[in-house]
Image: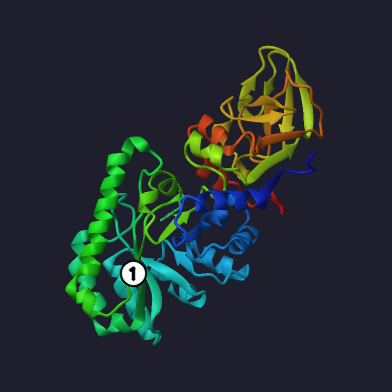
Amino acid sequence: MVAETTLFIDLEALAYNYQVLRQKLEPKTKFLAVVKAATYGHDPGPVAQKLVALGVDYFGVAYASEGAALRAAGIDKPILLLHPMAAHFELILQHKLEPSLYSVALIRQWVEFLASKNITDYPVHLKFNSGLNRLGVSLNDLPEIIDILKAPKAKKTINLLSIFSHLGASDDLEAEEFTLGQIAQYEHFYNMLVGDSAFEKLGLNRPWQHLCNTSGVLNYPQAQYDMVRCGIGLYGYGNDPQHDKLLKPVAQLKAPILQIHHVAPGQSVGYNHGFVATNSTVVASLPLGHADGLHRIFGQQQGFVWINGQRAEIIGNVCMDMLMVDVTQIECHAGDTAIIFDQEHGAQDLAEAVGTISYELLTGLSKRIKRTIIP
Ligand SMILES: *Cc1c(COP(=O)(O)O)cnc(C)c1O
């Protein structure tokens, strides 16, 4: 029984998933936990604190504000900032976030910024675009990058800790050729830069290498290099039914039935007659809607919930704060609990039913949903 719509967050499952992923890796490989988008919609403070206790080496966030929130939650591990922008340079510095430098322009801006503040030896990471064509420097940028790095200003201000890239289809074994091509391009770029005589003369430490996300770890462990960056796997999803079985969903979303209606043939349910009953229909109303991240696409019998062990389709149009499900065949009452997803009925299945992925369903769960930690 739940008194209100609640996302339960099982920290034991988080620990379990961490161990599963960790066991795929060499002991020396560092583990970066990706905690962007409010720990994929979970609860950043407690989840990140648990990850520290489990022994992760690094955190990764998308935006500076997310790094600031981690610091506010008492996290003092290194934080890689994946998508920095000039508007946030002060915030990055203030919270000791380590920017991913993904363009020649950004490298220049960051070096100038540090120099203007007389800051030396600031940890940064260089991102190479190996085929995702999202963010990253290219092979053509090499001469310019080497020029910048060997100039006194950059030598003084930045400490290039790693050179990394990101896989675009590591979850799709049919795209193996593409992924192996990405790995080869990344290695080529790394060797060109680090092997360049100008780079060697800089007397820098060898930057570490990292490439794999969760599916990279599961499908291409040979490419683990010095560190991996895992997000979705920690939260219990592996992007493939085989891998899902190895992991335990951390989040469980439940809502109480607020009211039951008996709808006669010809009557409708929800806005704009989104559902019209052809037979006598029993309808249960649940307190969550598109403002909570259960988008309208889940309506019209596309999405479903579980009530007393049975599947109930979402009927009509999902409202902002409520949705209605068909419980004609299910013995249930106001106050009973509807499971939107849990460890048995994973978010992956519900996401797939409407043509999306666990990532989108989880990260879209709004702040309005109460979070309850199961320690
Ligand atoms: C989000 C992200 C990850 C984590 O990916 P998962 O598939 O959730 O493991 C890793 N690296 C980068 C650059 C990312 O943007």
Judge from the rendering whether residue 42 lies leftward or rightward of residue 230; answer left or right.
right
| In the rendered image, the vertical position of residue 185 relative to residue 109, given as above or below | above
View extreme (bottom): residue: 118
Residue 177 is situated, as x and y percent measured from the top left of the image, at: 27, 40
Q: Quadrant of the N terminus?
A: top right
- Coloration mode: rainbow
On the rendered image, what quadrant is the C terminus found in?
bottom right
Relative to the observer, which residue lies in front, 254 or 321? 254
Q: Does residue 255 appear to the left or right of 296 in the view shown?
A: right
Would residue 364 be seen by someone viewing this image from the given angle?
no
Q: Which residue is mark 1?
A: 207
> Residue 48 falls in which quadrant of the image?
bottom right
Secondary structure at numbered mark 1 = loop
Q: Residue at x 56, y 52 (%)?
A: 19
Where residue 165 sits: x, y (%)?
A: 34, 57
Q: Position of residue 50 (x, y in %)?
A: 63, 60
Establish if 351 lies above or below 215. Answer: above
